[in-house]
Each structure stands twice: as structure tokens, then as C-alpha cells.
Image: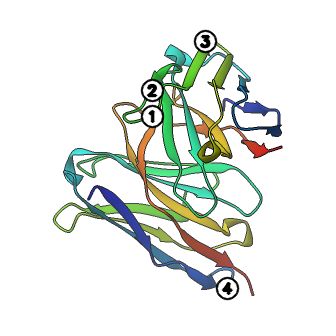
């Protein structure tokens, strides 16, 4: 079955760190760029970061640059998001999403909830 | 950064009716690189349209996209009960600076 499954969410205090994972199955993971997208409570979708299929290129939204790091392990078909110095405004459901031929998203996971609160 | 404004915020319609959703960009979207997604509560978003007017695999033909430059439209010709959801537009013409609209909720009247 072609799918993406996120994990690692939870409640964390401001300033602390958290690492999310995204496990891929049913397709050739190493052939695709993969993105993180988030949706804060009551708000719309926000693109967070992308990593190329070969992990040689990464790009970040200005709101997370310098705090978040995207990475991948193609041998494990897994994507990661290391989130440091978390802020309350990072509270959101985090989705991993497969990049299409261009920079749209043709497959999404169901998401994992991150709550940053003291 | 290209800002996408979706309207209306909420659309109240009955099954069988036509839905017209608007997405307006603050500047021209290069190559009409605009996509539409549907999201139901507790579910992953689903790609409907890419390249402004190309339907994604498996998407029924009652969904259609149109427009160019700064004005784009998603039309659902006849609403089915399973179509009620939140819809988002996304531009990828200025990649890697990707942006989404704020969403339009299509609810049952």
C-alpha cells in the first residue's frame, strides 16, 4: 500500500526539542523529494521544509529556518524533522507529503500533532 | 512571497448544486503552477488539481480547475455528499517558496 505515516508528535515545553519521523511504503522512496507541511489549530496549511530525493538539497520556510532540520534515510525509507528551540506558534499537525513532478504534493500522511506549551 | 487569498471562506450548498471556489494570487503565478487540495476532518489532504487545470489520478471529472495569472477557480459541477470538506489552493511557481491559501469550507446547507 502506497502510504506515508508520521510519528513522534507530543506535548513539549517551549525551548525544547522534538524529532518527527515519516515512514514511507509502497513506492520508491529514494526517487522522490519529500516535504513537511503543517496546519496550526484553526489555521490553513503552511509549507515547512523539503529535502531532495538524494538528500543533497534542503529548503526551509523562513519561520523555521535555523531551528528545524529535515533529513532522510533512504535505506530505511524514512524522513525526519528535527525541531529545536520550539515555540508555542509551532503547535500544529505536521504532515509529510511526497513531491510531485513539480513542487506540489501528490501523497500525504495523516499527520502527527505537536503541542508546544508550558 | 506570493499571497493566495481564497474566497468565500465558507460556502453553504446542497448536494447536487454547483460549487465555485476562488483563489487569487498577489502576483502572477509562474507557468500557472497552482494546485488544489481537499481535506476532510481527521484525514490527510488529497491532491485534486495541479497545473491549474490537470486532474490528479483518480479524481472524478466533476472536479475541474481553471484560470491563469492571478485568478484561479475550482469548480465542482454537482456536489456529492462526500465532497463536503475544506479546499486549499497552493502555488508552486515560486518554488522553493511555496504558499497555500487560507482555505474554503464547503458545508452542507
The residue located at (55%, 65%) in the rendering is A67
Q: Which chain does tag 2 point to?
A: B
Quadrant of the rendering where the N terminus of chain A is positioned: bottom left
CB within 8 Å, label 1 to label 2: yes
Visible in this render: residue B24? yes
The residue located at (69%, 19%) in the rendering is B27
| Residue receiving disc 4 | A13
Task: Check disc 1: other Cα within 10 Å, few if <14, some if 14-19, many if 20+.
Answer: some
On residue B102, the disc is none
| Residue receiving disc 1 | B59
Quadrant of the rendering where the C terminus of chain A is positioned: bottom right
Co-location on one chain, circles 1 and 2: yes
Q: Position of residue B71 (x, y in %)?
A: 69, 16
On residue B68, the disc is 3
Q: How is the image coloured?
A: rainbow
CB within 8 Å, label 2 to label 4: no
Q: Is residue A38 left or right of residue B49?
A: right
Whether B28 is drawn above or below B91: the answer is above
Dot in front, 3 or 1:
1
Co-location on one chain, circles 1 and 4: no
How far apart are the alpha carbons under marks 2 and 3?
Answer: 16 Å
Amino acid at each position: 500500500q502506497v502510504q506515508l505515516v508520521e510519528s513522534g508528535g507530543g506535548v513539549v515545553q517551549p525551548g525544547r526539542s522534538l524529532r518527527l519521523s515519516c515512514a514511507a511504503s509502497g513506492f520508491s522512496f529514494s526517487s522522490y523529494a519529500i516535504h513537511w507541511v503543517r496546519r496550526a489549530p484553526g489555521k490553513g496549511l503552511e509549507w515547512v521544509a523539503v529535502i531532495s530525493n538524494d538528500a543533497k538539497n534542503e529548503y526551509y520556510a523562513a519561520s523555521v529556518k535555523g531551528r528545524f532540520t529535515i533529513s532522510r534515510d533512504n535505506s530505511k525509507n524514512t524522513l525526519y524533522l528535527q525541531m529545536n528551540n520550539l515555540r508555542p506558534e509551532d503547535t500544529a499537525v505536521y504532515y509529510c507529503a511526497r513531491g510531485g513532478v513539480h513542487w506540489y504534493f501528490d501523497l500525504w500522511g495523516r499527520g502527527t500533532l505537536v503541542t508546544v506549551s508550558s | 512571497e506570493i499571497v493566495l487569498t481564497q474566497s468565500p471562506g465558507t460556502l453553504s450548498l446542497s448536494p447536487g448544486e454547483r460549487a465555485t471556489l476562488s483563489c487569487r494570487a498577489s502576483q502572477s503565478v509562474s507557468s500557472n503552477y497552482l494546485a488544489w487540495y481537499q481535506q476532510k476532518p481527521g484525514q490527510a489532504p488529497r491532491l485534486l488539481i495541479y497545473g491549474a487545470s490537470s486532474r490528479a489520478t483518480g479524481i472524478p471529472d466533476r472536479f475541474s480547475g481553471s484560470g491563469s495569472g492571478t485568478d484561479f477557480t475550482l469548480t465542482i459541477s454537482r456536489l456529492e455528499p462526500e465532497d463536503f470538506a475544506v479546499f486549499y489552493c497552493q502555488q508552486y511557481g515560486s518554488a522553493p517558496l511555496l504558499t497555500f491559501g487560507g482555505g474554503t469550507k464547503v458545508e452542507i446547507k
